[in-house]
Image (tube, grey):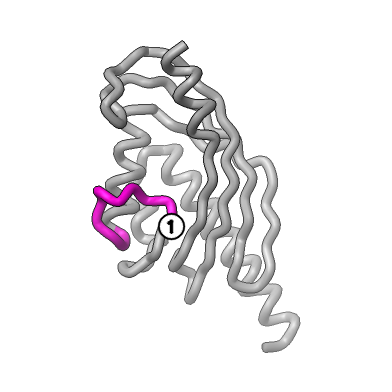
Amino acid sequence: MSTSSLDSTTTGNVRAMRRWADAVNRRDLSDASSLIAADVVDHHLPPTLPPGRDGVVMWCTLLCDALQMTIHVEDVVASGDRVAVRATITGRHVADFGGLAATGRTFTAQMMSIERFADGLLVERWENVDTAGIIDQLTS
């Protein structure tokens, strides 16, 4: 693969990642879904959700509905088919989430992810969120 082709692909992957985050923030999950491969592997999905695009969309819907989550992208590092993201997520707990009844409290947490793309679609992702920090903010 030539350097110019690699740069173009990497740039396209960064654009797709940013479009995905923007779609989630707008609560436009049909747009977000259009950027995800049907057989995407999300290593962060709870085991109770189905694999693939359906599970990712269900998870995003839950985060948007119950936590009113917003993604604030802080840093992006990309190479080839991988895009690494450092983000701050914020939200308000307005509905049942993981067995915890709505508290109305707000939260701020750090998130890091690595997204892998193929043909402009998200095909695999790894994510690490400060879940303990979120729970502490919602229950303290």
Q: Position of residue 39 (x, y in %)?
A: 33, 69
* Residue at the outermost right position: 3
Give the x, y percent position of residue 121.
45, 67
Looking at the image, is 33 positioned above or below residue 60? Answer: below
Q: Quadrant of the N terminus?
A: bottom right
Residue 47 left/right relative to 119: left
**From this viewpoint, is residue 39 visible?**
yes
Q: Nearer the viewer, residue 26 or 133?
A: 133
Residue 46, percent from left and from top: 33, 47
The amino acid marked with disc number 1 is: His
Tell me which corner region of the image, top left, top right, bottom left or bottom right, holds residue 41. Answer: bottom left
Above or below 7: residue 104: above
Position above or below: 101 against 40: above
Can residue 30 be seen by looking at this rendering? no
Q: Residue at x 75, y 82 (%)?
A: 3
Residue indicated by mark 1: 43
Mark 1 Cα shell of 10 Å, populated few (<14), some (14-19), many (≥20): few
Residue drawn at (30%, 31%), measured in percent from left and top? 98
Q: Is residue 111 left or right of residue 49?
A: right
Tell me the magenta residue range.
43-53
